[in-house]
Image (cartoon, grey):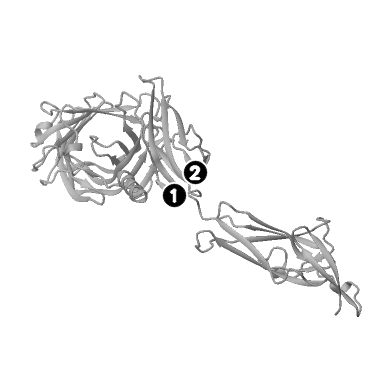
């Protein structure tokens, strides 16, 4: 029953951390909403990470840009905003940082869920050039920003056009158009765990968006300027959170240098919350268990204290009991409980903790088992003994990796004496071979044999096998006998003493 309970616990934990994510209209922004993002330092050096299933994106070393380092997006009624009237289906406008120099306009298309916003067009004003520009996407297929609903491997592609207008200084309004050259590609290319410095999202869905289009400014019906625009973006979404929680955008167009924007949603929590998850809930004493801290806040003055019961743990990879995300090896088999305590004086109350009882089950790792035998333990003087090593695994599994051998010979009365035995010159039977040959040269002497076997694939390596008084040279041939009696020598490995007995001939 206990194994069954453990199995379901592991299954549930795996599902909770690695489940696919579905983003729907409930995650869309809404009229009157404000979402604040914090910008990250040096985004041009950012690495987008892997695609696929069950990915871990670890960005816990990112730091915020210097102030001002926020982008505040407001979602407004577009009524009365510049040139919204040329976009007949506009229902909502996106405004950045309270400025009136630019808006993205959205409609909800012909869909049942009014939250499924699609980008209809935009308006921008550049004060340095006294330039106004507005564009309305056309062809009846407005450009989708987030085509709700979507999940892993969802894709969306379209080729689009647009028209609009511009005003440059005293030049009267004229025509802007995007010919049938605009391409938009939306690909949900990965899901997994997103680790940020302040927060961890166990289930995040990443969307990769690329768009390329040409804007033509006409003057008197003739092209006056052409701009190529290219954008590539990565967005991470989490169920239950409006808009992306993390994004990276690379933009270039016209003579403008490439710009990079990397930002995450500003935290909205007002109290300490504690939670954590291990990458596995069962294993053995050789395994390294990685703990991911799902608490808030992960920085800004937080102090962490991890404890385990029983306390037979070893912290790995430079982590310790105060690390944000520790790695541990449980050195003894058993069932372990884990506790995380957080202290942060910026919050009230300033401490919080979470204990998971009987959270980790650990078995003894497969152990290296070593032994050896000899073809004789009572060799004649100056004769050779062939030793055979035996290396197996405690759970009867095949031995993995390479095992190395060291053989040592020690005498009963002079452990440092090596002139009374020798190994052959052949490496295949020398002191580092699996099965050496040793010649013993001194009569009436016991020899201890020591084998050290090393295999780095096993935590109990190296293994030493020591057999005291294992070899006893037979000295009968060197003792005197006559027709009336004979001398018999009995080796006694328990005390390293030879017993000599004279037996009368019958």
Mark 1 or mark 2: name the one nearer the start of the chain: 1
Q: Nearer the viewer, residue 324 or 141?
A: 324
Residue hosting label 1: 283
Asked if residue 444 is positioned above or below residue 188 in the image, the reply reads below
Asked if residue 477 is positioned above or below residue 137 in the image, the reply reads below
Residues at marks 1 and 2 touching, judged by CB atoms closer than 8 Å: yes
Q: SS class of the residue under badge 1? A: strand
Identify the mark at residue 330; answer none if there is no mark: 2
Picture quarter with the C terminus:
bottom right
Q: Nearer the viewer, residue 60 or 271?
A: 271
Crowding at dot 1, Cα within 10 Å, few <14 / some 14-19 / many 20+, comes out as some
Give residue 325's position: percent from left, percent from top.
44, 37
Q: Nearer the viewer, residue 181 or 99?
A: 99
Give residue 72's position: percent from left, percent from top.
27, 27
Mark 1–mark 2 Cα distance, whole angstroms, equals: 9 Å
Query: For this view, does 158 lie left or right of residue 12?
Result: left
């Amino acid at each position: 029953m206990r194994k069954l309970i453990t199995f379901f616990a592991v299954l549930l934990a795996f599902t909770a951390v690695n489940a696919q994510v579905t983003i729907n209209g409930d995650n869309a922004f809404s009229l009157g909403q404000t979402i604040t993002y914090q910008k990250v330092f040096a985004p041009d050096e950012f690495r987008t990470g892997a695609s696929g299933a069950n990915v871990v994106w670890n960005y816990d070393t990112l730091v915020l840009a210097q102030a001002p380092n926020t982008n505040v997006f407001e979602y407004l009624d577009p009524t009365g905003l510049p040139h919204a009237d040329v976009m007949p289906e506009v229902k909502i406008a996106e405004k950045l940082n309270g400025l009136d120099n630019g808006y993205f306009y959205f409609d909800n298309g012909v869909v049942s869920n009014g939250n499924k916003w699609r980008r209809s067009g935009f308006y921008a004003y550049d004060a340095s050039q006294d330039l106004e520009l507005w564009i309305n996407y056309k062809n009846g297929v407005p450009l989708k920003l987030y085509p709700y609903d979507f999940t892993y491997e969802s894709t969306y592609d379209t080729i689009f056009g647009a028209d609009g207008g511009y005003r440059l200084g005293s030049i009267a309004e004229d025509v802007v158009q995007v010919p049938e050259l605009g391409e938009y590609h939306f690909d949900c290319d990965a899901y997994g765990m997103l680790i940020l410095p302040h927060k961890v999202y166990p289930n995040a869905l990443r969307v990769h968006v690329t768009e390329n289009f040409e804007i033509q400014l006409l003057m008197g019906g003739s092209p006056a300027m052409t701009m190529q625009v290219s954008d590539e973006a990565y967005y991470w979404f989490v169920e239950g959170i409006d808009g992306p929680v993390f994004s990276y955008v690379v933009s270039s167009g016209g003579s403008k240098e490439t710009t990079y924007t990397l930002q995450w949603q500003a935290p909205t929590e007002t109290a300490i919350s504690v939670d954590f998850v291990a990458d596995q809930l069962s294993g053995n004493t050789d395994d390294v268990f990685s703990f991911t801290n799902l608490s808030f806040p992960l920085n800004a003055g937080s102090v962490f204290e991890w404890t385990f019961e029983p306390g037979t743990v070893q912290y790995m990879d430079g982590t310790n009991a105060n690390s944000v995300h520790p790695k541990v090896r449980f050195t003894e088999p058993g069932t372990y409980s884990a506790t995380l305590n957080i202290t942060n004086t910026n919050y009230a109350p300033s401490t919080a903790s979470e204990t998971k009882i009987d959270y980790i089950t650990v078995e003894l790792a497969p152990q290296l088992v070593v032994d050896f035998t000899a073809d004789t333990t009572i060799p004649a003087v100056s004769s050779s003994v062939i030793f055979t090593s035996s290396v197996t695994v405690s759970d009867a599994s095949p031995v993995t990796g390479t095992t190395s051998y060291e053989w040592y010979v020690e005498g009963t009365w002079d452990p440092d004496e090596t002139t009374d035995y020798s190994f052959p010159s052949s490496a295949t039977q020398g002191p580092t071979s699996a099965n050496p040959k040793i010649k013993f040269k001194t009569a009436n002497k016991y020899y201890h044999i020591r084998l050290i076997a090393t295999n780095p694939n096993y935590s109990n390596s190296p293994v030493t096998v020591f057999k005291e008084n294992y070899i006893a040279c037979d000295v009968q041939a060197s003792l005197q006998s006559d027709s009336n009696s004979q001398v018999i020598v009995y080796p006694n490995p328990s005390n390293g003493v030879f017993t000599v007995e004279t037996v009368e001939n019958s």
